[in-house]
Image (cartoon, rainbow, N blue to C red):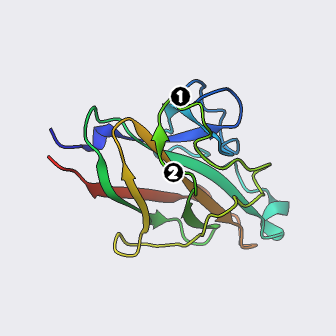
Amino acid sequence: MAITATDIHFRGSITTGTAGNQSVFGGAGTSLGKYVVNNDLVDATLNNLFPDTTGDENAASNVDYQLVFIYNAHGTLTWQSVVAWLSAEVAGGTSAAIGVDTTAASALGSATAQAVTIANKNTAPAGASFTSPTTKGAGVSVGNIVAGNVRGLWVRRTAANTGAVDSDGVTIRAEGDTAA
């Protein structure tokens, strides 16, 4: 059976522990790389990945980074030629960009680091190149994700010293091909 939307999961990360898929997501602002957590990010939830931008952070045009893992939970099929892009972004607030982590895709429970680790939310991840594609055709190549594997995608949020915006955010979409 083909890979369907229910086979694809977006998860945060944790910098502690000994392997992926062992710990629960710590909440907004804590997804700093290393291992995938064992629960999905909740769609359309305020402060899902990033905490609020404070007035001081906004005035300083603060830049934050958080990691999202894309997990292929299909039992046998590789999700092929995966591409990610920003399908919607709230106007007038912060701006978003994405970049693929330099660590290769790995098994969900891998004991080897599954992504680069950053010191804090304001530290750029080594090796990631950021862009703000708004269509699939311009999207970033995530590559193939084998069944039961994860791949890291960094999200950069840049404040622009704008007026306050309620429910500021971005929607990240990923699509790929399936063999069956």
Q: Residue 29 in the image: x percent, y percent?
A: 70, 45
Mark 2 highlights which residue? 104
Left or right: where 28 falls relative to 100: right
**Which element type, helix, strand or loop, lies under badge 1?**
loop
| Of residues 72 and 105, the one drawn nearer to the viewer in this rendering | 105
Instruction: Identify which residue is drawn at 80% across, 48% down.
Output: 119
Q: Quadrant of the N terminus?
A: top left
Q: Are marks 2 and 1 in contact (CB under 8 Å)?
A: no
Q: Residue 34 in the image: x percent, y percent?
A: 65, 41
Q: Is residue 165 visible?
A: no
- The correct choice, above or below, for 166 with respect to 160 in the image is above
Instruction: Identify which residue is drawn at 42% across, 39% down.
Output: 149
Q: Residue 104 in the image: x percent, y percent?
A: 51, 51
- The correct choice, above or below, for 167 with respect to 26 in the image is below
* Foreground tag (2 vs 1): 2
Instruction: Identify which residue is drawn at 62% across, 57% down.
Output: 166
Instruction: Identify which residue is drawn at 46% across, 58% down.
Output: 172
Amino acid type at circle 1 is: Asn
Amino acid type at circle 2 is: Ala
Mark 1 highlights which residue? 21
